[in-house]
Amino acid sequence: MRSSRAPFPRWNRATGSIGRPRGVFAMQSATDATERLRTINRVITESPALLARERQVFAQYTESLAALLAEESGVDPDDVEPHVVASALLGVHRSLIEYVRRRVAAGAGVPELGPELRRHGERALALLERGLAEYGIER
């Protein structure tokens, strides 16, 4: 029987943090990619049904990732920690998507978005990796 979990990669605790990015997204032509991104952005943001489906998919992925994290860390599936971690990681993903949508709506193209997205993604994951204890505290 097939699992209903989303296709998340297995986590090998010996290889390091689950929050580390592992790949690079590349497009063929910057002009074509920018135009495609603008079209996708417009279609999704103008469709209440697609936005609702997107929220539903993210909720399903969050639950699937939480189940996988619980299984692989040996904790009870109802434990709050894997759900917190899954929500935080998928929250980074959602936040980056929203960032791209705002930038595309403002006229940004793929060439400038790539480095921006990487920088923001790395900062977000670093924040999660070091913890939230000092977030927002003036120094």
Image: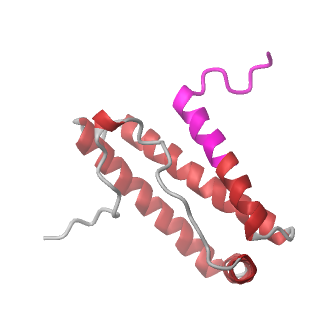
Q: Going by the image, does 100 lie left or right of 107?
A: left
What span is in magenta? Answer: 120-139
Q: Is residue 123 magenta?
A: yes
- Image quarter (top left, top right, bottom left or bottom right) of the N terminus: bottom left
Picture coordinates of residue 36, whole percent (x, y): 69, 82
Q: Is residue 25 above or below residue 49?
A: above
Q: In the image, what residue occupies the spot 50% across and 62% down?
A: 58
Picture coordinates of residue 100, whole percent (x, y): 72, 63
Picture coordinates of residue 52, whole percent (x, y): 58, 72
Q: Going by the image, does 109 lie left or right of 2?
A: right
Q: In the image, what residue occupies the spot 78% across and 62% down?
A: 112
- Image quarter (top left, top right, bottom left or bottom right) of the C terminus: top right
Q: Is residue 21 above or below residue 29?
A: above
Q: Quadrant of residue 6?
A: bottom left
Q: Quadrant of residue 71?
A: top left
Q: Going by the image, does 16 lie left or right of 116?
A: left
Q: In the image, what residue occupies the spot 82% across and 71% down?
A: 105
